[in-house]
């Protein structure tokens, strides 16, 4: 509250706001209500847990907390293990190169030359030039997020360029490209739309076995000790998704193997969000595709 009052009065003085007394009279009752307000039981519980959490973090500095790679989940991990795993990732000489000196001065110099060239050719305005130029000598920072949906919880490297010399330039170019390029069919706007898409993901296959037996095999295949994975197991491991095993349907029944294969390829072609490989349709003559697509 004290900090708020100090900032409040400072801004009054700085911006020469007229009718200060009138504005103060409107703000004072609000401040009084805030200062005299009582906490609900839920708010008291949250404040108590917050205090306990601060004490726990201060007493256990070797534990760090971060977000998971996917999902609204908080991950707690040992600081030594985290640093070791990150150093192991960055030790890959095929992916990362160790620099002999800080490149930030060269980056700023090249950025300035580029912006002067754009301004000289009237490609950007003065205001855009000032927005894009940055003298912040801060390099992008990298950190890792745990992939809790994968075996062993490996780290995913995230590079944050916020505050770095090229951040505004990257945002500027991204906006141009985003407004110029057509929207991809695979693009989703948010998690709710992603859920609707994943609900429609399907896999087709033919079998001469009983349906119940084949489903049981697919469900248990993820636990098999084998290097060969089918598309169902691969999707479950890579994406962390599972299938609605109670909504399996028989689309067609044919006693002959060749007819089952043809039927399988036709239904694969008609899928909206299928996981089947393109090689699963190699036996279907392409001349049939326009006809099938119109069905």
Image (tube, rainbow, N blue to C red):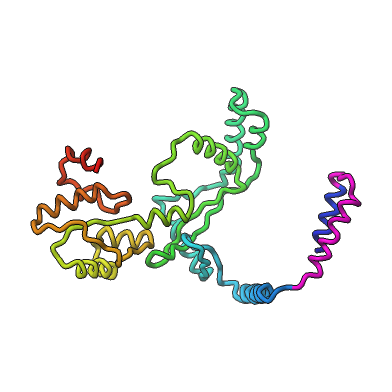
Give the total of numbered labels.
0
Residue 291 in percent (x, y) is at 21, 39
Position of 267 with respect to 244 (left or right) is left
Residue depicted at 34% across the width and 62% down the height: 237
Taking 189 as reference, is 182 above or below it?
above
Residue, far front: 295
Q: Is residue 16 magenta?
A: yes
Q: Position of residue 221 (x, y in %)?
A: 25, 67
Residue 106 is at least partly visible in this image: no
* Any part of residue 121 in sight: yes
The N terminus sits in image quarter: bottom right
- Residue at image coords 55%, 47%: 101
Tell me the chief SS of the magenta region.
Answer: helix
Residue 279 sits above or below residue 31 on the image: above
Q: Position of residue 252 (x, y in %)?
A: 18, 56
Residue at 19%, 70% (x, y): give it.
Answer: 213
Q: Quadrant of residue 8?
A: bottom right
Q: Nearer the viewer, residue 169 or 79?
A: 169
| The C terminus, quarter of image | top left
Q: For the view shown, which residue lies furthest in the left direction?
A: 256
Residue 7 picture location, percent across and down: 81, 55
Span highlighted in magenta in the image: 14-38
Q: Is residue 205 magenta?
A: no
**Residue at the farthest right position:** 21
Q: Is residue 280 above or below residue 131?
A: below
Q: Residue at x 84, y 61 (%)?
A: 29
């Amino acid at each position: 509250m004290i900090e708020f009052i100090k900032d409040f009065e400072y801004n009054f003085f700085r911006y020469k706001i007229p009718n200060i007394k009138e504005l103060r009279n409107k703000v004072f009752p609000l401040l009084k209500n805030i200062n005299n307000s009582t906490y609900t039981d839920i708010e008291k519980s949250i404040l108590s847990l917050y205090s306990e959490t601060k004490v726990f973090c201060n007493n256990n500095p070797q534990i760090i907390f971060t977000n998971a790679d996917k999902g609204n989940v908080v991950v707690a991990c040992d600081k030594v293990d985290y640093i070791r795993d990150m150093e192991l990732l960055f030790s890959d000489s095929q992916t990362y190169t160790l620099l002999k000196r800080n490149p930030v001065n060269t980056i700023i110099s090249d950025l300035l030359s580029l912006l002067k060239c754009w301004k000289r050719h009237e490609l950007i305005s003065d205001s855009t030039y000032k927005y894009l130029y940055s003298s912040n000598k801060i390099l992008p920072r990298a950190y890792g997020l745990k992939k809790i949906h994968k075996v062993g919880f490996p780290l995913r490297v995230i590079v944050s360029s916020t505050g770095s010399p090229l951040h505004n330039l990257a945002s500027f170019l991204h906006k141009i490209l985003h407004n110029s390029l057509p929207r991809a069919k695979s693009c989703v706007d948010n998690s709710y739309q992603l859920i609707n898409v994943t609900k429609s993901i399907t896999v087709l296959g033919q079998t001469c076995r009983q349906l119940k037996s084949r489903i049981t095999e697919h469900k248990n295949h993820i636990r098999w000790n084998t290097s060969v994975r089918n598309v169902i197991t691969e999707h479950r491991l890579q994406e962390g998704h599972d299938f609605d095993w109670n909504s399996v349907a028989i689309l067609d029944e044919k006693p002959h193997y060749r007819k089952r294969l043809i039927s399988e390829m036709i239904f694969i072609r008609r899928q909206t969000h299928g996981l089947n490989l393109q090689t699963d349709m190699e036996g279907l003559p392409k001349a049939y595709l326009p006809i099938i697509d119109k069905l």
